[in-house]
Amino acid sequence: MKKSTKIGATLITGANSGIGEALAKRLIARDEQVVALGLEKPSWTHDLLVSRALDLTDLEEVRKTASEVCRIAPVRRIVHNAGAIISGRIEDASPEDIEMLARLHLGAPMALTKAALPAMTEEEFGRIVFVGSRASMGMATRSAYSATKAGVHGLAKTWALELAPKGVTVNVVAPGPILTDNFWGEVPKNSNREEQIARRIPAGRIGIADDVANAIEFFLSEDSGFVTGQVLFVCGGLSLGGL
């Protein structure tokens, strides 16, 4: 069967590690082109991989890079995966934390989506997926992170309503604890704390990057055109209770 020409390239932010890297490798294994954007380029190369290093909190740099990559690659799908955690209870938190994470979690996705949208709507096909977080439901020490990840839900649902008539879907995959550098930046690897978290997850384990990449692939599929504006928690059941 001939592969559809609608798919085009998939732009993934934060594809140099963790969930973004796992997804990029899965797509490339299916002979699909990937554009990787993030603070660092992936440590590996492939003929189907285009990568650019940039600061996603610098919105002017994001706009410039987005315009460039959309000229050289037929971006029809975007995965807004890049994220950062700033920890601290309210006594230690800062309004500037929210400002910075809002640029990363909300501003950069808007700039990238605006650059790719004309080609998506012309083709009447597009897939936009945000990587949110179970922390959007609330989590101690995560004021800025939880607030901006909750904002992702509102942004995605709004875009879903606006873009559905144009053949573009917008969805969110919201992971719980996943064994990535972001997780180990907060929880020491192989520590008692890591074991305690695993025991509190109904599935009995902490997730891995491929658990999330698998869910993202569902939303990216050409066959998923009737699913939009949804938030899918990939958390081993943790969202049913709380951490």
Image (tube, rainbow, N blue to C red):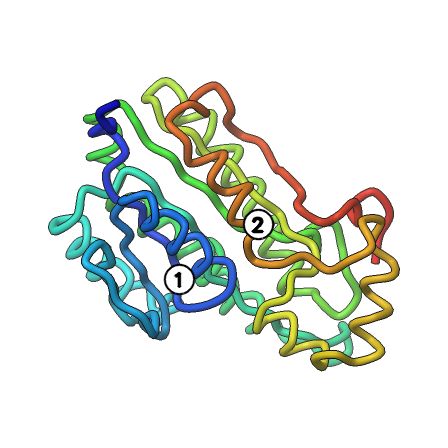
Measuring from the top left, give residue 51's x and y in whole percent.
Answer: 25, 64
Q: Residues within 10 Å of mark 2 (few under 14, many from 20)?
A: many
Q: Residue 167 vs residue 189: left or right?
A: left
Horizontal and vertical percent for residue 147? 64, 56
Residue, disc 1:
15
Q: Quadrant of residue 76?
A: top left
Report the residue at 27% width, 34% height from top: 7
Q: Is residue 113 above or below residue 207?
A: above
Label 2 or label 1, whichever comes before in sequence order: 1
Task: Find the residue positioned furthest to the left.
Answer: 72
Q: Is residue 100 left or right of residue 97?
A: left
The answer to whether 233 is drawn above or below residue 133 in the figure is: above
Look at 41% across and 48% down and name the residue there. Answer: 79
The secondary structure type at the circle numbered 2 is helix
Q: Residue at x 60, y 53 (%)?
A: 149
Q: Which residue is mark 2?
A: 212
Which quadrant would the C terminus be assigned to in this image?
A: bottom right
**Where, quadrant-wise, is the N terminus in this rendering?**
top left
Question: Type of residue at label 1?
Answer: Ala
Residue at 49% across, 69% down: 100
